[in-house]
Image (cartoon, grey):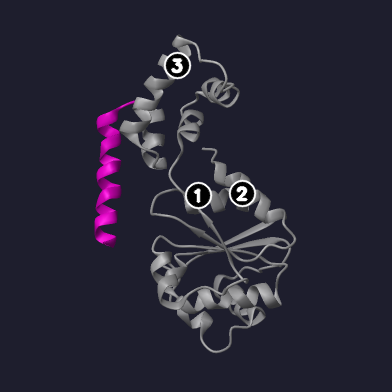
C-alpha cells in the first residue's frame, strides 16, 4: 500500500547532502516494507537483518572504516555493494550498537553510498550510546493516517474530497456522513498496516482483531 513516508524517502534518496538515515518508529508500522519499496528504485538493494545474520557484531569489531566493513560484508553475503548504485539497509541495527556509531563514518568517508538503518527497539540503543550529531538524520514513521487509510481501502475519491475541500464552506451532508462512517471504521481498526490489509481483503472485523492481539502481545513482550 502507498504511504506518505514513500515521498519523504524519495526526497532523502535524491538529496545530494543526505546523511545515513535512521528510520524510527514502533513495531509493525511498516518500516521494513517502506525501505524495500524504496530499494526498487535502485539498481541494487542489499538488506542486512542483524537478527538473521550470524554474528553481525564481528563486522564492526576493530576499526569502523566503511570500506573495510563493506568489503567484509560483501564477502559474508556474497554480493557486491556499490556506492551510487546500491541501497544498503541495516535492519534491527539496535542489536549491534557499534553499527550505529559506524554510521557517522559512512557519512564522512563514503557519502555517496545510500545507507538506511531501522529497528523496532532502536530508541533504547540510542539512549545508551547516542547518535552522531550532524552525521546521521532521523525520519519517524507512524501507523496509517486517516488519509492513508482511505487510500488503502480504495476510497481515492474520498481522499480527493477531503484534500480539495475549502475550509470556508460546509461539506455536503451526504459526503460528511459518508466520511464519518469511514472515520468510525478507522477508529475501530486503527492504522497498523497488517490490520488495514486484513480489512481491505476480508472486511471481517473479528478476523482483523486477531492482528490487534498479535501486535499488542509483541508490545507487551518489549515492555
Asked if the residues shown at circle 3 and circle 2 are in contact, with their CB atoms under 8 angstroms apart, the answer is no
Q: Hey, which quadrant is residue 82 in on the image?
A: bottom right
What residue sits right under mark 2 in the picture? 8
Does the magenta portion include 209? yes
Residue displayed at 66% across by 72% down: 107
- In the rendered structure, the answer to whether residue 190 lies left or right of residue 165 reads left
> Residue 17 at x, y = what percent?
72, 63
The span picked out in magenta is: 202-223
x then y, percent, for residue 69: 60, 79
Name the spot of residue 207 as percent of width and height, x first: 27, 33
The residue where tag 1 is placed is 33
**Is any part of residue 70 visible from this angle?**
no
Are circles 3 and 1 on residues that touch, CB within 8 Å?
A: no
Q: CA distance from mark 3 to mark 2?
A: 30 Å
| Dominant SS type (magenta) | helix
Mark 3, residue position: 176
Q: Secondary structure at mark 1?
A: helix
Q: What residue sits 63% from the left and 83% below the top?
A: 65
Cα distance between the residues tagged 1 and 2: 14 Å
When the figure is inspected, residue 106 is found, relative to residue 173, above or below; the finding is: below
Residue 104: quarter of image = bottom right
Image quadrant in which the C terminus is located = bottom left
Calculate the distance from the C-alpha at mark 3 to the C-alpha at mark 1.
Answer: 33 Å
Image coordinates of residue 172 in percent, x first then y, are 49, 11
Q: Earlier in the sequence, mark 1 or mark 2?
A: 2
Amino acid at each position: 500500500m502507498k504511504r506518505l513516508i514513500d515521498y519523504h524517502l524519495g526526497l532523502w534518496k535524491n538529496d545530494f547532502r543526505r546523511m545515513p538515515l535512521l528510520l524510527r518508529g514502533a513495531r509493525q508500522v511498516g518500516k521494513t516494507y517502506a525501505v524495500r519499496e524504496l530499494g526498487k528504485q535502485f539498481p541494487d538493494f542489499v538488506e542486512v537483518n542483524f537478527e538473521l545474520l550470524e554474528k553481525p557484531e564481528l563486522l564492526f569489531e576493530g576499526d569502523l572504516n566503511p570500506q573495510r566493513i563493506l568489503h567484509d560484508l560483501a564477502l559474508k553475503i556474497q554480493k557486491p555493494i556499490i556506492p551510487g548504485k546500491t541501497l544498503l539497509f541495516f535492519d534491527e541495527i539496535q542489536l549491534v550498537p557499534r553499527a550505529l556509531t559506524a554510521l557517522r563514518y559512512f557519512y564522512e568517508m563514503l557519502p555517496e553510498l545510500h545507507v538506511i538503518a531501522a529497528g523496532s527497539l532502536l530508541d533504547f540503543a540510542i539512549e545508551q550510546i547516542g547518535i552522531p550529531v550532524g552525521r546521521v538524520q532521523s525520519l519517524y514513521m507512524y501507523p496509517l493516517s486517516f488519509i492513508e487509510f482511505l487510500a488503502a481501502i480504495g476510497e481515492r475519491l474520498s481522499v480527493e474530497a477531503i484534500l480539495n475541500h475549502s475550509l470556508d464552506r460546509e461539506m455536503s451532508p451526504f459526503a460528511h456522513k459518508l466520511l464519518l462512517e469511514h472515520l468510525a471504521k478507522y477508529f475501530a481498526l486503527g492504522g497498523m498496516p497488517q490490520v488495514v490489509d486484513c480489512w481491505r481483503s476480508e472486511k471481517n472485523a473479528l478476523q482483523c482483531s486477531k492482528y490487534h492481539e498479535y501486535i499488542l502481545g509483541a508490545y507487551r513482550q518489549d515492555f
